[in-house]
Image (cartoon, helix red, strand yellow):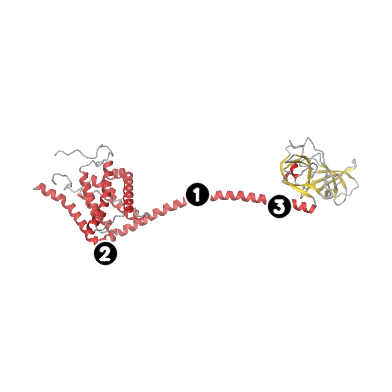
């Protein structure tokens, strides 16, 4: 009897709960009325709790999103830095191109104003020796370049072609100790022979008579008498004049008008109506191997 | 017959405060977090995990009261038929409580099977009761299959991921030690 009571007792609550729940369910199955007291009471009680949890979750979600955004910003920052680096490189190349364009334009202007037919060439190498001065250009026999042609820039005379291969040519600059050119002082109209003295040094004007009225800062141009350099090309400016008593001639130095160390493009004068370059003998010691 | 089964002990074993708190937290997560997942038909019932464990370990009527209350709160917050969750969860806990007396609750497979049973029973009740009482069939196969699969998988993953901590935190020293200490699921028949 006692055992039966305890068993009944143990089943009472589960059966009660199940019955209540089922009746609740069955009662709301047809008409799920939410305006009854129970749902409203539960919502009223749980509402603030839900609000707090919702805020908490929103806070967590926002923090997480901010963190993700921060990672995104870092990535974006990295990308932008790379982009800036790339654009800087491009800008540099464009500036380089603009400068090259400017130099080409000057060379072409020179070509049109001088009346010479010319060929623009790039300097692809320089003389590795300290005792000579030469340039190697990217134009050669295929482009119609021959030995003896005059090489100039818009600033003045550079030198003379001394060696030609199919695709390259070598220029002996006026700075070379073996170089010389027939020149004319523009104001005093004094003829002289200009000689190179090596890299980094000024030209020397020879055979100027002591009586000649040379002036400092006088412009020196080619005279054309040597049949190598056409008449009227700027060579430099007189920087010093010395009249030594024991010498028959004046010692005049000329600063080159061309900055040889910064040459990147030059013009090779091919021909003109009144001037044909003398064919110089190829020099074995300067020839390109 | 009934008296021969130690189904539901008349000594009411109430879940402790920590256990109730855990159920409450899962309820809160269910309402606030799971409900905001923007995947259609993906609403795994998180409260089934602690309720299953509690039913297996505690097994008593107290867990059933907790399940009833949790279900009732869910019913009130959701717009489903009032009383469904209260009924289904009470029934699930009741059956699992009975099963908990016959199986080894520490066994992981037993726990997983119990969880699977809980999910399936809740599904069956949801569809079957409505069909029996109203004649409406709620079965729309792709959705139901998706919902069932995702719920089972999600709850399994959550269960496997949190099981150890739940048992350590909530049931210290009470049949919570080993995971697969026993090779079988079923207990040996009791000698009376």
Label 1 residue SS = helix
Percent x, y of residue B92? 23, 50
Label 2 residue SS = loop
Q: CA distance from mark 1 to mark 2?
A: 52 Å
Percent x, y of residue A18? 20, 54
Residue sitting nearer the eye, B62 or B18? B62
Image quadrant assignment for residue B182? top left
Q: CA distance from mark 2 to mark 3?
A: 86 Å
Do the residues marked 2 and 3 share a common chain?
Answer: yes
Circles 2 and 3 in contact, beta carbons < 8 Å: no
Q: CA distance from mark 3 to mark 1?
A: 40 Å
Can residue A140 be spotted in the picture? no
Residue sitting nearer the eye, A126 or A220? A126
Could you tell me which residue is drawn at 24 percent across and 42 percent down? B105
Residue sitting nearer the eye, B67 or A116? A116
- Which quadrant: the N terminus of chain B? top left
How would you rate the neighbour count of disc 1 (Cα within 10 Å): few for under 14, some for 14-19, many for 20 or more? few
Residue A44, relative to residue A122: is it above or below? below
Can residue A149 be spotted in the picture? yes
How would you rate the neighbour count of disc 2 (Cα within 10 Å): few for under 14, some for 14-19, many for 20 or more? few
For this view, does A228 lie left or right of residue A34? right
Mark 2 lies on residue? A35
Q: Chain ID for label 1? A: A
Which disc is residue A75 wearing? 1
Q: Chain ID for label 3? A: A
Q: Residue furthest left?
A: A1
How would you rate the neighbour count of disc 3 (Cα within 10 Å): few for under 14, some for 14-19, many for 20 or more? few
Which disc is residue A17 wearing? none
Label 3 residue SS = helix
């Amino acid at each position: 009897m006692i055992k039966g009571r305890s068993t009944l007792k143990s089943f009472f609550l589960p059966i009660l709960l199940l019955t209540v729940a089922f009746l609740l369910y069955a009662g709301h199955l047809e008409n799920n009325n939410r305006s009854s007291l129970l749902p409203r009471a539960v919502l009223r009680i749980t509402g603030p709790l839900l609000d707090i949890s919702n805020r908490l979750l929103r806070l967590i979600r926002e923090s997480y999103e901010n963190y993700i955004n921060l990672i995104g910003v870092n990535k974006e920052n990295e990308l932008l830095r790379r982009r800036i680096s790339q654009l800087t490189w491009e800008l540099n190349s464009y500036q380089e191109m603009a400068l090259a364009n400017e130099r080409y334009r000057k060379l072409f202007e020179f070509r049109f104003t001088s009346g010479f037919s010319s060929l623009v060439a790039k300097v692809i190498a320089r003389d590795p020796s300290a005792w000579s001065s030469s340039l190697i250009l990217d134009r050669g026999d295929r482009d119609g370049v021959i030995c003896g042609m005059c090489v100039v820039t818009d600033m003045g005379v550079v030198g003379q072609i001394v060696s030609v291969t199919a695709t390259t040519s070598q220029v002996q600059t006026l700075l070379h100790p073996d170089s010389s050119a027939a020149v004319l002082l523009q104001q005093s109209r004094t003829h002289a022979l200009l000689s190179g003295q090596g890299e980094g040094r000024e030209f020397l004007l020879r055979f100027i008579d002591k009586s000649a009225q040379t002036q400092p800062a006088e412009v020196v141009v080619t005279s054309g008498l040597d049949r190598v350099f056409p008449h009227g090309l700027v060579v430099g400016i007189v920087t010093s004049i010395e009249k030594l008593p024991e010498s028959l001639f004046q010692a005049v130095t000329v600063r080159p008008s061309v900055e040889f160390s910064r040459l990147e493009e030059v013009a090779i004068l091919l021909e003109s109506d009144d001037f044909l370059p003398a064919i110089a003998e190829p020099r074995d010691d300067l020839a390109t191997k | 017959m009934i008296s021969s089964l130690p189904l539901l002990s008349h000594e009411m074993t109430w879940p402790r405060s920590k256990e109730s708190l855990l159920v409450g937290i899962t309820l809160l997560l269910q309402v606030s977090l799971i409900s905001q997942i923007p995947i259609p038909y993906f609403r795994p019932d998180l409260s089934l995990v602690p309720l299953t464990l509690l039913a297996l370990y505690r097994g008593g009527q107290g867990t059933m009261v907790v399940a009833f209350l949790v279900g009732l709160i869910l019913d009130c917050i959701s717009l489903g038929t009032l009383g469904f969750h209260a009924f289904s969860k009470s029934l699930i806990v009741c059956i699992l409580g009975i099963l908990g007396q016959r199986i080894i609750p520490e066994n992981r497979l037993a726990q997983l099977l119990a969880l699977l049973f809980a999910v399936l029973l809740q599904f069956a009740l949801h569809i079957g009761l409505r069909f029996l009482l109203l004649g409406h069939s709620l079965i729309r196969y792709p959705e139901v299959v998706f919902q069932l699969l995702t719920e089972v998988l999600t709850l399994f993953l959550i269960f496997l991921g949190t099981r150890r901590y739940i048992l350590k935190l909530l049931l210290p020293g009470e049949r919570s030690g080993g995971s697969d200490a026993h090779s079988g699921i079923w207990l040996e028949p009791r000698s009376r």
